[in-house]
Image (cartoon, grey):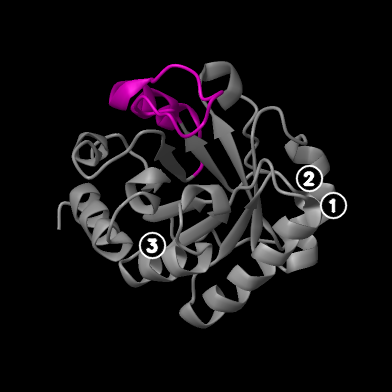
Amino acid sequence: MTRQVPDLSLYLVVGAGDTGSRPLEEVVLAAVAGGVTLVQLREKNASTRAMLERAKRLKVLLVPRGVPLIVNDRVDVALAAGADGVHLGQDDMPPADARRLVGEHMVLGLSVGDENEAETADPALVDYIGIGPAFATGTKADAGSAIGPDGVAALRRRVALPAVAIGGITAANAVALRDSGVEGIAVVSAICAAEDPKSAARELRAAFSGA
């Protein structure tokens, strides 16, 4: 079965702790209005029930807007919420096991940060990869050292899968990723910490696409 890979142009990674005093749903809706094409719910500290409830609420909001929902790490939450996919880190469930659980209909993403990790991205199991950290980031404590645009490009060439760059990306430095070969950029704080998430999303899309 051939799975449809979502539009990776502007990928928002978000959790309740990323939006400050603003409701998660408010920030996500504004970001989607500004051009976000894919949303990932990433909740490392929430209870299973809280994460599931958030995933279900986001799914309800995103379906009529044609934006897929990806759940970070938690295959069980993704299945229960009816999400469109799961994104796995290198320390999460192996892609082969995740694929057995979710079947052929769900999208699977995988984070890679070096050549060894890139080798684990089996196109028979994984639908896209997240490459990074592209730049220094304070959002993810275990993100590792920044690999820069050249590092992103090098890993992109090694994997025959669609890819997004992630890690410390802003409207100012997204320009440097235009020629890296990735299909899109993934961000957290560039949108979630912005005073106007809708405008921030528009600026990011314009910066990366050059439009």
Q: Position of residue 157 (x, y in %)?
A: 41, 29
The vertical placement of 142 against 103, above or below, is above
Q: Residues within 10 Å of mark 2 (few under 14, many from 20)?
A: many
Q: Amino acid at mark 3?
A: Val
| Among the two numbered marks 2 and 3 on one chain, the one whose residue lies closer to the N terminus | 3
Measured along the vertical axis of the image, is residue 80 above or below residue 162?
A: below
Q: Are marks 2 and 1 in contact (CB under 8 Å)?
A: yes
Above or below: residue 30 compared with residue 94: below
Left or right? Give the position of 157 relative to 119.
left
Which residue in the structure is indicated by mark 1? 101
In three-dimensional space, the C-alpha distance between marks 2 and 1, rounded to whole angstroms, equals 5 Å
Q: Which quadrant of the structure image shows residue 57?
A: bottom right
Instruction: Determine which of the numbered discs, if any, sits on residue 36 in the image.
Output: 3
Residue 124 percent across, percent down from the top left: 68, 44
Name above or below for residue 41 compared with residue 161: below
Q: Which residue is mark 2?
A: 98
